[in-house]
Amino acid sequence: MSSCCSLPVDEKGFLIEIPEENAQIPLRAKNACPTCRQKGKPVDTATVKSMLSVSLNQIKDVPYFFCQNRDCPTVYFSNDGLQTFGRDEVRERVYQKEPDMDDTFVCYCFRHTVGEVRTASSESQAAILDDINAGIKAGQCACDLRNPQGSCCLGNVRGVIKQAEKLVVATV
Ligand SMILES: [Zn+2]
């Protein structure tokens, strides 16, 4: 009998998987991406289905997660860690994976790209935020089906604007 305090861990502190008779959950850090081991964000299966460019007969009836780690090629993974979908299996370029590409969408519903938001004047940036907010209010957005992260883009748009402001300050 092993106690919880004697579970084997590797040099990074991650549990090492050991086959155990009654183990139902693999000894992987909970919700961790099987590729990079960082914690993923729960995502609706509807999002995964609408974003994938591969046959959906691969979709299983299990929870899926979104890996936000920029340096990791995996976009979605199943909760059991046995299935991963990479960047080239997703229909859109994923903002979290390529946030510096000008033609990556940061707002997928109303089609605003990173380049557009970054290079816009502060008035135009405010107008873009107004445009997105108005669309949300009017019920026109479909973040769960359009945005690979499966949720609202506003935080990301604000992030791009903040970064652009920092660059302006740095170059003045
Ligand atoms: Zn990952």
Image: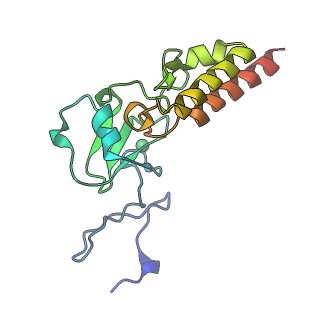
Which quarter of the rendering shows the N terminus? bottom left
Which quarter of the rendering shows the C terminus? top right
The image position of residue 145, as x and y in percent, is 37, 34
**Closer-to-camera residue (141/65):** 141
The residue sitting at 41% across, 83% down in the picture is: 3
Q: Quadrant of ligand 1?
A: top left
* Left or right: 46, with 42 as reference point: left
* Left or right: 61, with 26 as reference point: left
Q: Quadrant of residue 50?
A: top left
Tell me which colouring the rendered structure shows: rainbow
Q: Which residue, as the protein is rendered here, is positioned at the far right?
A: 172
The relative height of residue 167 versus residue 83 in the rendered view (above or below) is above
The residue sitting at 22% across, 53% down in the picture is: 61
**Closer-to-camera residue (45/24):** 45
The image position of residue 52, as x and y in percent, is 28, 32
The residue sitting at 49% across, 28% down in the picture is: 95
Q: Quadrant of residue 2?
A: bottom left
Q: Which residue, as the protein is rendered here, is positioned at the far front?
A: 138
Q: Which residue, as the protein is rendered here, is positioned at the far bottom?
A: 1
Q: Quadrant of residue 160?
A: top right
The image position of residue 96, as x and y in percent, is 50, 33
